[in-house]
Image (cartoon, rainbow, N blue to C red):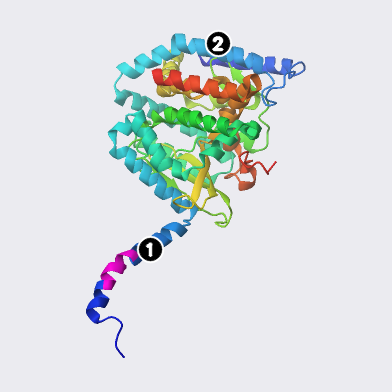
Amino acid sequence: MTPLLNQKEGLSMWRIFAPVIFSLLAALPAQAAQQAPDVFLQELSNELLEVVRKDPAVKAGDLQKLTNLVDTRVLPNVNFQRMTASAVGPAWRQATPEQQKRLQEEFKLLLVRSYSGALSQIKDNQSIVVKSFKGNPDDNEVVVRSEIRGGKEPLPLDYRLEKSADAPGGWKIYNFNLLGVWLVDNYRTQFAQEINAKGIDGLITTLAERNKSNSRK
Amino acid sequence: MQALSHRFTWLLIGGCLAMTGCASTSGGNPLDPFEATNRRIDAFNDSVDQAVLRPVAKTYFDYTPTLLQTTVQNFFGNLRDVWSVVNNGLQLKPKETVETGVRVAVNSVVGLYGLLDVGTPLGLQKHPADFGQTLGYWGMPAGPYVVLPLMGPSTVRDAAASLVDSQGDPWGYINPVASRNQGTVLRLVDKRAQYLGLDNRLNEMVLDKYSFVRDAYLQKRRAQVRRGPPTDAEDEQENFDRPDKK
C-alpha cells in the first residue's frame, strides 16, 4: 500500500492547514459565546474603566474620542434602538423608520454629551463590583446588580440585559439604573411632553436644538 | 436657619392639605397633583440658588483648601451617620445598622470627632437612612410630590418626616445658637458646592428639568423604601420596540 502522501508532504500540508484549522477553532467559541450575565458585565465594566483611566483625553471629556469609544466599545453591547423606543414610549410604534433613526441619533448624542463630564469624576480607587447573578441564566431578559465602590458609600448601579446572538458577550444592555433611578424611564415623561405638544418631529427638532446648543458651550 | 425651614415646611404641609380638595384637575402625573404650585416654588428656589447659594458655594469651592472641604464633609457626614444608624435600626436592617454604627464609633474616636474619615479606608461603608424612608419601609405611602421652598423635592410624607430628621440631627443641639447657625450655613454651602458640576449639566441633558428631577426623586425614594432588593417582577419593562407586543 503506497501512502497517498509521504511524510514530508504530509508535514508541509499540515503547515498550510494548521493555521486555518486553528483559526476556525478559535472562531467557534467566539461565535457561540454566551457568557454568564454577571461575568459579561464585570468584564465590560473593567475594560471600560481601564480605557478611560489610560486615556487622559477621554477623561477630560474629549467629545470626539468619547464618541469613538462609545461607538466601538459600548454600543455593540447595547440595544440602543430598544432604549430609545422605551424612552419615547407608545409613540415609537407610530414613528416612521426615518424618524426612529433620527431619534436614536439625537438621543445618543444627548447621552454621550451628558455623561462626558462624569468621566472626569472617576477616581483611581473606584471600581465596579458586579454582584453574582442569582436569576435564571436561561431567561431572555435579566437584571444584574452592581455597586460602584471606592467612595464613602456604595452606589448601586443595576442593568437590564437581553439575550442577543450578535452581541460580543451574548448580552445587550437596554436600560440601567443609577442610585435607584432607571435612566430610560426617567426620559419618558420628558419625551411624552414634547410629543403631546409638538408631535414626533417636534421632539426630534427639540433634541437636535438641545444638542446644537450644548455643543456650542 | 433651621427654624426658618421648619416654618416653611409646616406652611407647605398645611397648604397641601388645604389644596387636596380642589386640586388635580389637569391630566398630569397623578403623583404630582400640585404641579402648578410646585413649578412656581421650583422656579423660586432656582432663582434663590442662582442669586445667592450657587455663587457662595462657588466661592467656597474655589477659594478654600480642598482639605478643609473634605474635613467639613467628614464632620457633618459623621453626624448624619448617627441618625442613619437609628433609622437603619428602625428598619430592622442588621448589616446596615452595625456597619454604619461601627463607622460612627471609629470616626468619632479615632477620627477626632469625625474630622477624619478613617472608616472608609477600613471598608466601613455608610448606609444613609432617614425617617421618611423608615415610614415608607413600614408601609406609609409617600403621598403627593411637593417642592419645598428652599429645600427642594420632597413628598408630603418625607416633608413631615424631615421635621423628625432635624430633631435627630446632633448638630441641632449645639450651643450657643450662634455657633450652631454658623455651622448650619457652612454645612449647607458645602453641600451645595458638591453639586456644582452637576447642575449645569442637568440643564443640558434634559428637556424639562422640573419633571426630570421629580421623576428621578420619586423613583429614587421608591427604591430606597423597598424592602430588600427589587424583585424582577416589579422591574418588568415594556418593550416598545416590539410591535407585536401590546
Q: Badge 2 sits on which subunit?
A: B
Q: Please, what secondary structure does the residue beneath circle 1 have?
A: helix
**Relative to residue A47, is residue A84 depicted above or below?**
above
**Disc 2 and disc 1: Cα gap in Å?**
66 Å
Q: Badge 1 sits on which subunit?
A: A
Q: Name the residue that disc number 1 marks.
A: A24
Q: Is residue A123 left or right of residue B219?
A: left
**Front-most of residues B84 and A6:** A6
**Front-most of residues B73 and B146:** B146
Res. B232 visible in picture:
yes
What residue is at 63 percent from the left and 26 percent from the top? A192
**Residue that lies at the very extreme toward the right in this rendered image:** B21
Is B54 colored magenta in this rendering? no
Task: Locate residue B133, reporting x and y percent.
Answer: 59, 33
Task: Locate residue B171, reporting x and y percent.
Answer: 46, 23
**Residue that lies at the very extreme toward the left in this rendered image:** A8
Nearer the viewer's eye, disc 2 or disc 1? 1
Task: Locate residue B36, reporting x and y percent.
Answer: 65, 15
The number of numbered discs placed on residues in the rendered structure image is 2
Quadrant of the snapshot with the N terminus of chain A: bottom left
Residue neighbourhood size for the residue with mark 1, other residues' Cα within 10 Å, grouped as few (<14), some (14–19), many (≥20): few
Quadrant of the snapshot with the C terminus of chain A: top left
**Front-most of residues B69 and A23:** A23
Question: What amino acid is at disc 2?
Answer: Phe
Res. B115 visible in picture:
no
Q: Name the residue that disc number 2 marks.
A: B44
Q: Is residue A48 left or right of residue A161?
A: left
* Boundaries of the magenta span: A13-20
Question: What amino acid is at disc 1?
Answer: Leu
